[in-house]
């Protein structure tokens, strides 16, 4: 007995998936960046507030792209792809800014006292001098966080942009067919 392959996914279904995913992703980006913006403003961190505001704009771009697709405009897909490139640029810019302007002493002062004591004890146990090696440890941690952030963003934003791009033919075919299911409309 041979198994038959499943039938191909209809263009309308692919359009629905693109719309659902873009809606969820754009809302997630706008909520997270909006909260980050508020916290940054409350803390007086204007640079972080600027990065958060730029990320919120990227989320709004993706939302707008989804709305354009709902209106039957094929260039909405270009907005979805562009939003990923824009957000990736913001994230890389943030990581580069963090690498250039990291202040180990200020970061150390923000760590709660029990955690600082724990780190100092672990450094001493590992044979490190807490006074001379602490800055190197904090800078290394900052570097690794920035590398992880850029790496994750490369995979996520790059993968999502590629996925949107691969859906282009099906989305355009679905937009040419006026019977787009009402379930995808807000």
Image (cartoon, rainbow, N blue to C red):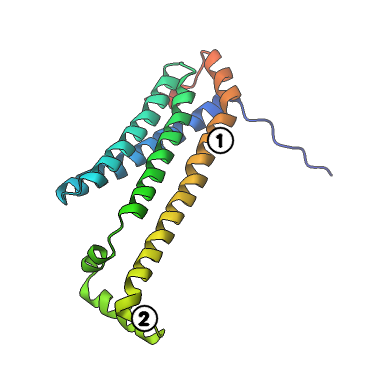
Mark 2 crowd level (few <14, some 14–19, many ≥20, 10 Å Cα): some
The local secondary structure at tag 2 comes to helix
Q: Is residue 97 left or right of residue 22?
A: left
Query: Residue at point 55% right, 13% down?
Result: 176
The disc label shown at residue 162, or none:
1
Mark 1 crowd level (few <14, some 14–19, many ≥20, 10 Å Cα): few
Viewer-side label of 2, 1: 2
In this picture, is 172 found above or below 84?
above
Query: Residue at point 24% right, 45% down?
Result: 47
Q: CA distance from mark 2 to mark 1?
A: 44 Å
* Residue 115 percent coordinates (x, y): 27, 75
The local secondary structure at tag 1 comes to helix
* Quadrant where the image shows the N terminus: top right
Q: Which residue is mark 2?
A: 123
Mark 2 and 1 residues: CB-CB less than 8 Å, in contact?
Answer: no
Query: Residue at point 31% right, 45% down?
Result: 32
Q: Which quarter of the picture shows residue 41?
A: top left
In this picture, is 153 found above or below 176?
below
In this picture, is 117 found above or below 161?
below
In this picture, is 47 found above or below 174?
below
* Residue 7 percent coordinates (x, y): 69, 31
Question: Which of the pair 10/49 is nearer the observer?
Answer: 49
């Amino acid at each position: 007995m041979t198994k038959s392959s499943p039938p191909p996914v209809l263009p309308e279904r692919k359009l629905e998936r693109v719309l659902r995913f873009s809606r969820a992703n754009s809302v997630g980006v706008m909520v997270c960046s909006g909260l980050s913006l508020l916290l940054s403003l409350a803390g007086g961190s204007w640079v972080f507030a600027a990065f958060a505001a730029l990320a919120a704009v990227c989320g709004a771009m993706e939302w707008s792209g989804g709305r354009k697709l709902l209106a039957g405009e094929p260039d909405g897909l270009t907005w979805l792809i562009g939003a990923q490139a824009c957000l990736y640029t913001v994230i890389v810019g943030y990581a580069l800014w963090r690498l250039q302007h990291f202040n180990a002493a200020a970061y150390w002062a923000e760590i709660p006292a029990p955690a600082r004591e724990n780190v100092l004890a672990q450094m001493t146990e590992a044979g490190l001098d807490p006074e001379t090696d602490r800055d190197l440890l904090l800078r290394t941690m900052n570097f690794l966080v920035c590398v992880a952030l850029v790496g994750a963003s490369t995979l996520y934003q790059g993968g999502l942009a590629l996925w949107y791009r691969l859906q282009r033919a099906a989305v355009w075919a679905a937009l040419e067919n006026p019977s787009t299911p009402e379930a995808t409309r807000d």
